[in-house]
Every structure is written in structure tokens, then in C-alpha cells.
């Protein structure tokens, strides 16, 4: 699908047509075309009715999508997650899918946020709208702890991954 809006960035600005492709996002202005590869995306989010896409080199703010804003963000997230699954060598159909809060500690740092969470036969996949996606191999699982509204997976390697149950539903990711 093609979307019409306005982009503000150092690389390209003005009225544009956007399309979400297998390799990334194509931004076409009247005399210029720009490609944002999924590998270059650090994060993306909805912020004040605009989609903000951050890369290491630039920040792209897409405004004026109107009613197509949610559709654009949904299509972007699905295409981005498809690329992340491929990069993390995850194939097949998940046994369970949800969205929710996560938190993980990998020894050298901790991250948290909202993400799509998918459970496969051999792993759990965390798919946030940034470059913090994780594949948690269940073969390294040595403990699973349940507490109030939280499930924590602990691995032999010392990492821990927590998933928090939401007290209320609603809102976008």
C-alpha cells in the first residue's frame, strides 16, 4: 500500500509517498527517492500523531498520514518484525502470540518496554519497535519464576527476561 504524508529529516523533506517494502521503507518526493533499510532502524514510534523513525544517521518524522497513520505503523511493524525473525533465525508459526511489557537483564545492561511476544517450540521472541529484539532459546532455561503479574525466565547464562501482565488492555504498542 502507498501512503501520502510529509517527511521532515536531514536526508529528505516535504510532501512524499511512502511504501513499506520487504527491504525497508521507500520515501518518494517529487524529485528525490530515499530508502530506509530495516537494518538501519534504531526505533520507531507514534508520537503526537506522527510516526518517528530513528536511524543511526537521521531522524525521520512522518506527519499528515491522517486516517492511514495506524495502517502505516501496523504495516511497518509487521515488515520490521518479519526481518527481525529472519535475522534471529526464527522460522515457523508461533504457538502463542501477545503484546505486553517486558524487561530483561543481560549482565551488561537492562532494557524494558512494550513488544510483541511470540512463543515457539524452541524459543521465546521479544519484538519491540526498536533494535532490542531478542530470541530466548528455551534449551538454556534453568528457572521460571511467577510472582504478582510477572513471569521471569532465567537462563544458564545469567540473563533473565520478565514479562509483565497488564492490569488493563488498550492503547497501541
Image (cartoon, grey):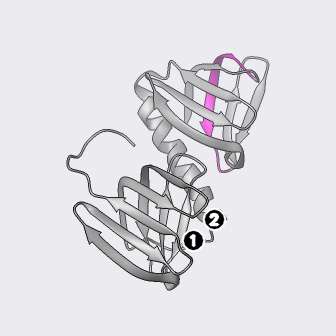
Q: CA distance from mark 1 to mark 2?
A: 6 Å
x 26%, y 42%: residue: 170
Q: Which residues are magenta?
A: 12-22
Q: Which residue is mark 2?
A: 86
Residue 131 colored in magenta in the image: no
Looking at the image, residue 165 sits to the left or right of residue 159; the answer is left
Tell me, yes or no, whether the two marked residues, 1 and 2, touch with CB atoms within 8 Å.
yes
Q: Which quadrant holds the N terminus?
A: top right
**Where on the picture, by quarter, is residue 172?**
top left
Looking at the image, residue 25 sits to the left or right of residue 136; the answer is right
Looking at the image, residue 21 sits to the left or right of residue 114; the answer is right
Q: Residue furthest right?
A: 31
**Which element carries disc 1, helix, strand or loop?**
loop
Looking at the image, residue 150 sits to the left or right of residue 50; the answer is left
Mark 1 burial class by Cα count in 10 Å: few <14, some 14-19, many 20+: some
- Compare residues 90 and 126 and report the one nearer the observer: 126
Q: Position of residue 2 (x, y in %)?
A: 57, 33
x 27%, y 57%: residue: 165
Residue 13 colored in magenta in the image: yes
Q: Position of residue 56 (x, y in %)?
A: 72, 38
Q: Position of residue 37 (x, y in %)?
A: 71, 44
Question: Which disc is residue 152 wearing?
Answer: none
Question: Which disc is residue 90 wearing?
Answer: 1
Mark 2 burial class by Cα count in 10 Å: few <14, some 14-19, many 20+: few
Q: Which quadrant holds the C terminus?
A: top left
- Compare residues 41 and 144 and report the one nearer the observer: 144
x 56%, y 64%: residue: 106
**Where on the picture, by quarter, is residue 96?**
bottom left
x 66%, y 43%: residue: 41
**Which element carries disc 2, helix, strand or loop?**
helix
Q: Main secondary structure of the magenta part?
A: strand
Instruction: Indicate whether 89 appears above or below 21.
Output: below
Amino acid at each position: 500500500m502507498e501512503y501520502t504524508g510529509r517527511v521532515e529529516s536531514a536526508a529528505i523533506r516535504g510532501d512524499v509517498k511512502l511504501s513499506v517494502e520487504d527491504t525497508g521503507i521507500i520515501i518518494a518526493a517529487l524529485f528525490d527517492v530515499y530508502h530506509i533499510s530495516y537494518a538501519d532502524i534504531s526505533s520507531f514510534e507514534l508520537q503526537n500523531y506522527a510516526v518517528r523513525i530513528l536511524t543511526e544517521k537521521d531522524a525521520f518524522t512522518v506527519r499528515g498520514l491522517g486516517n492511514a497513520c495506524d495502517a502505516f505503523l501496523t504495516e511497518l511493524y509487521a515488515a520490521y518484525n518479519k526481518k527481525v525473525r529472519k535475522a534471529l533465525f526464527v522460522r515457523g508459526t508461533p504457538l502463542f502470540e501477545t503484546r505486553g511489557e517486558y524487561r530483561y537483564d543481560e549482565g551488561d545492561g537492562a532494557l524494558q518496554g512494550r513488544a510483541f511476544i511470540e512463543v515457539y517450540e524452541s524459543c521465546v521472541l521479544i519484538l519491540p519497535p526498536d533494535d532490542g529484539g531478542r530470541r530466548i532459546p528455551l534449551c538454556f532455561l534453568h528457572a521460571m519464576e511467577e510472582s504478582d503479574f510477572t513471569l521471569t525466565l532465567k537462563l544458564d547464562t545469567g540473563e533473565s527476561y520478565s514479562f509483565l501482565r497488564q492490569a488493563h488492555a488498550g492503547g497501541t504498542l
